[in-house]
Image (spheres, helix red, strand yellow):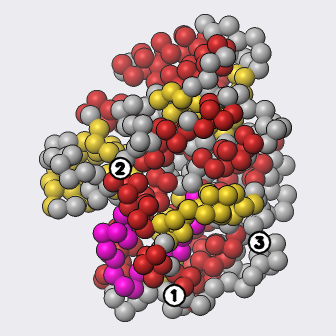
Amino acid sequence: MCLGIPMQIMAIDRFNAECEARGVQRTVSLFMIEDSEVAVGDYVMVHVGYALRKITQEEARSSWELFDEMLAAVPE
Amino acid sequence: MSENLEAARVWLGRIQALPITEPIAVMNVCGGHERSLTHLGLRAVMPANVKIIPGPGCPVCVCPEEDLADAIALALSGTVTLVAFGDMLRVPINAAKGDVNSLAAARAAGGDVRPISSPQEAVAMARENPARPVVFFAAGFETTTAPVAAMLAEGVPDNLSVLLAARLTWPAVDMLLRDKDASLDALIAPGHVATIMGAEEWRFIPERYGLPVAVAGFSAESLLAALYSVLRQKLEGKPFLDNCYPELVSAQGNARAKHWLAEVMQVGPANWRGIGIIPDSGFTLRGEWQRYDARARHTVLAAPRKRAGEMPPGCDCASVVLGKLGPDQCRLYGNACTPQHPVGPCMVSDEGACHIWWQAGMRAA
């Protein structure tokens, strides 16, 4: 429940951002992020629909590698 | 392979080169860490003397029976829509045979129970149908609770209320370490809890207990870096607070998230299922925000329970949560209790050690 997922910001409307990861789009709240902290194109770590913090593209990529490894390891 | 894996190999090489002659027990306190450690197979590559123990990292597992019973009673009342994170729906409580013993069973019995994956879904549901009371049953640690606080601070419709079963992580670790019998040598602190609350929250471990601690992320690289840090601290006899997830975790954490938490909630003693009351370990709504408390608003709550707070008979989940037993040491593990037919919450939740070990193919000892 405490595991965040990295997403990229595609558009921002006040406290809400349209974010995307692996082709999936989701509305993410920026209410826990400082006003000037993020812009379109940035990556954020998202947990239960809320951005926890801005992250670098590098960090987003390595987090996704981890998810891929774990998804590959878990039997359906 | 990836740079990430290359870096992980470097840390692993360093760990394997450490002169570890005595047993060292390292506890992690995050279900996400346990998932990564187990699925990446990191236990198998540790030096023989190093034992990694899953600790209290599963909020669903410690959610008190009485809170679940209240949520079930509300759902069965027929007067509200009960929403909860999906993990909560299959968690069983002790109930007489034939009685509704989970939110999933309440839904099967006609209760309006809906799984959500974000607080914003609860808000949207309440907005769509302003005449219908929506109760958000919110269990979780700081990472999940800060968004609940932010949701309320941003403004919610009047027909939404919150049944809060939110807990802080560090007080359970503090309680464990205060126990003189605790045979723990080092701790790995949770990365996304620390993203919100800050690494400094874990400084009490070296300062009060003289034990090493490192905040870790969820990749092999970050977890191995943290394991190397605490093992080396232990060998050198110089415990300190290390941060092996600096990309996300700062000393003080997310200031705005902490602001909303402090604004909307207060901290007090709270019951942990199978464990008991832990001081300063639970969130409740404070001040004007108490008007969103489902308990104040709805009288249809469960009758007081005779054996409130207990795990199901024969279930060792409480000992598993406290790191006193491994999942495979429970008598029910894989016998009466599997993810398809879970007896205890540790086999239900994605963050429960029993569920994680079973999914990774680990069978009874």
Asked if badges 2 and 1 are on one and the same chain, I answer yes
Q: Which amino acid, by three-letter code, is at mark 1?
A: Arg
Residues B111 and B299: in front is B299
Residue B40 seen in the figure: no
Instruction: Please identify, in this view, whether the residue under mark 3 or under mark 2 is nearer the observer.
Output: 2
Q: Residue at x 36, y 21 (%)?
A: B2
- CA–CA distance in space, label 2 to label 1: 31 Å
Going from the N terminus, do you reach mark 3 or mark 2 first?
2
Chain where mark 1 sits = B
Q: Which amino acid, by three-letter code, is at mark 2?
A: Ala
- Residue extent of the magenta highlight: B150-167
Residue that carries the numbered disc 3 in the rendered image: B308
Residue that carries the numbered disc 1 in the rendered image: B297
Where is residue B66, by image quadrant?
Answer: bottom right
Element carrying mark 2: helix
Q: Residues within 10 Å of mark 2 (few under 14, many from 20)?
A: some
Asked if badges 3 and 1 are on one and the same chain, I answer yes
Residue A7 seen in the figure: yes
- CA–CA distance in space, label 3 to label 1: 22 Å
Q: Residues within 10 Å of mark 3 (few under 14, many from 20)?
A: some
Quadrant occupied by the C terminus of chain B: top right
Residue B309 appears at what percent x and percent y?
75, 67
Residues B99 and B276: in front is B276
Going from the N terminus, do you reach mark 2 or mark 1 first?
2
Q: Is residue B73 above or below residue B226?
A: below
Residue B306 appears at what percent x and percent y?
82, 77
Instruction: Please identify, in this view, whether the residue under mark 2 or under mark 1 is nearer the observer.
Output: 2
Where is residue B90, by image quadrant?
Answer: bottom right
Where is residue B314, by image quadrant?
Answer: bottom right
Residue that carries the numbered disc 2 in the rendered image: B255
Are the residues flagged by discs 3 and 1 in contact, CB closer than 8 Å? Answer: no
Are the residues flagged by discs 3 and 2 in contact, CB closer than 8 Å? Answer: no
